[in-house]
Image (cartoon, grey):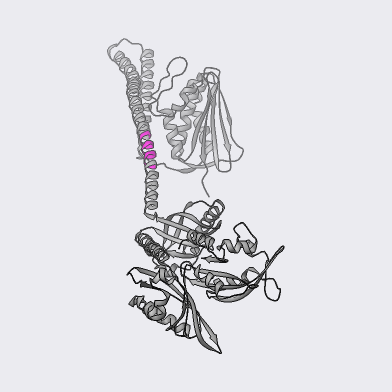
Amino acid sequence: MTKAKVEKYTETLNLPALEIIESADNLYVSKKLKSLLGIRKEPTKEFFQSDLFYDDNGEKISFDKLPFIKAFKSGKSALNSYLRYKNGKIEKSFYVDSIFLGGKGSPRLLTIFRDAEKSHGDDNLRETVDNLNAVVFSTNYDGSEYYYISDAVRMIFGFTPREIYENKFLILRTIKKEHFGRFKEFIDTLRGGDTACVEYQMKDRYGKEHWVRHNGIPIIRNGKVVKIIGMIIDITEEKINQLKLENSEEKLRVLVDTADDLIFILNGFGYISTINKNGSKTLGFNPQEMTGKHILEFVNKDNEFIVADAFSKLIDSRDKVFFEVEFMDKHGNPIIFEVHAKPLIIDDEVTGIVCVGRNISARKADEKKIKELNSKLIEANRIISIERERAKQKINVLEEVSKLKSEFISNISHELRTPLASIVGFAETISTDNELPPETIREFSNIILTEGKRLAKLINDVLDFSKLESGEEKLLKEEFDLADALNELLDSYSGQIKAKELSLSVQFPEEKIVIYADKSRIMQAIGNLISNAIKFTPPNGRISVIVENFDREIEIAVNDTGIGIPEKEIPKLFQKFSKIYRQGALQPGAGFGLALVKQIVDLHKGVIRVISQENKGSTFIIRLPKKKD
């Protein structure tokens, strides 16, 4: 019988009664009892908790001590309990009979209030019994003889009370054979002096099947069971609903167990009350090993805060949440699950949580691989971009080198052709003209000598640069006095300095400076700088050579007040094959002088830099490391 039907049935019951179903919170009161208690609205649990009931000693009875509540919670019937009711001007005394109707899924209890101030004759009893939708009976101690059975036996079994009195085995014969053992245990319990309840299936006299609940209470006198009273209720509808529910539960269980996801239910304290087989198998456990344990026992310690935070949000919002968390399998291996959780709410309280977790470890691994591949792809694209840029730079360099080589060939051709033309021209003149005066011959011979030396120097510069660049020639390092070597070098240029009327100043440290280097190459480099200073400084200009002695290096600076170098030309100043175009005419040279200087300085692990302004002059600074002790 459903709750709605129970409520309707109790409401219309033609006697003062109340019924409790499933929980002590669910009390249903008949109209007659409401009238006796002087109330109009449907009384709630709070009504019976309001200190309106007293025992025979005048003491207030708490809700849990009320006879029908005690009977319901104990699962046993209780008869003839005295109860006094006081509510304003209304005062009444009752004898209360609480009959436990049993039921595993939905236990029920029927309580009848009998006015203690009125007589309890057969008429009152018959009125009560006839209004019950149940068979009330009284038998001897072993149930073999019926003393009384109510008329409701017609509706359930199809027999009249007289037929039952005349044939005591009629009810026994209706019981299905497979359920007869239950009934026998029921009778044995009653014979032993304990109340009992049994559910069994039977067929009425018309062949229709029923499920009934058979309750019995032994009446004991002088320590012996002398009589059994009880009630038989038709629970067919209840059983059908129970079977439907069990069938639905079984289908749900099969569905849950066959699902590949991790499905589990937590109680209000976070302990696993139910978990599916496949889900627990994913973690290497069986359901029994996980049931009853706290969920955090199976979560990675580093992820416990994720679960706690998610469940906190779920309880606050009363809505579903989802989160990703690492579970640990039986062997300590992490498995990532995407968990969807929803609260179980009863009486506006979260009593549990239903969770469905999907194993996303493979997906996460794929995402990680994709991320790594994307990272590698980005790196590869970056490297390709760099290599592409390098290739462009190399092409530009090659194009520049090709251009410089072309210019070099043009320049070297010019540089070779000019002295050769002078040499050939003056030599032919001397050879063919026998009348040339000796002074002229001497002048032409000096020109031939000068141009020959210039040609030899050009060839030597090219050869030196080539050898140094290719590494064919090694440096011949030695210790020497830098000041002595510079003075000797400057003396070799004194004639050129005087010829252009230039002033020369020299500034050396007072202490002796000894360096470890290839003397001839260092002097060659500094000589090229002095030569350029002389070449590009106008008459009456100044040239200075300054030497500084630092802790770890020596600095040599060659300054002039010459025409200077355009700022845009400075970056290519030390490139091989390059010629610097200055304001005015192009000065003679093949573009090897400064490139050779830098090559020599680089081989000595030194550095060279230039500071220059057009029409103001230039300063070339060489820094060479000292010899390590």
- Residue extending farthest to the left is 432
| Residue drawn where x is 42% and y is 42% of the image | 476
Residue 414 percent coordinates (x, y): 34, 19
Tell me where residue 555 sits by quadrant. Answer: top right
How many marks do you count on the picture? 0
Q: Name the residue: 39% across, 21% down.
A: 450
Q: Nearer the viewer, residue 94 or 104?
A: 94
Q: Is residue 156 above or below residue 508?
A: below
Residue 354 point in image, percent of width and height: 46, 58
- Say if the magenta span includes residue 576: no
* Residue 283 rendering spot, x and y as whole percentages: 40, 63
Vertical position of residue 173 compared to residue 248: above or below: below
Q: Main secondary structure of the magenta part?
A: helix
Q: Nearer the viewer, residue 87 or 197?
A: 87
Residue 272 shows up from this direction: yes
Visible in this render: residue 464?
no
Quarter of the figure with residue 200: bottom left
- The structure residue drawn at horizontal position 39% and vertical position 42%, both measured from the top left corner, is 379
Magenta run includes residue 388 = yes
Residue 50 point in image, percent of width and height: 67, 64
Outermost residue, top side: 435
Nearest to the observer: residue 152 or residue 439: 152
Quarter of the image that includes the N terminus: bottom left
Q: Is residue 236 above or below residue 513?
A: below
Viewer-proximal residue, 436 or 245?
Answer: 245
State which region is magenta. 379-389
Task: Say left or right for 544 vs 583.
Answer: right
| Residue 574 drawn above or below residue 233 | above
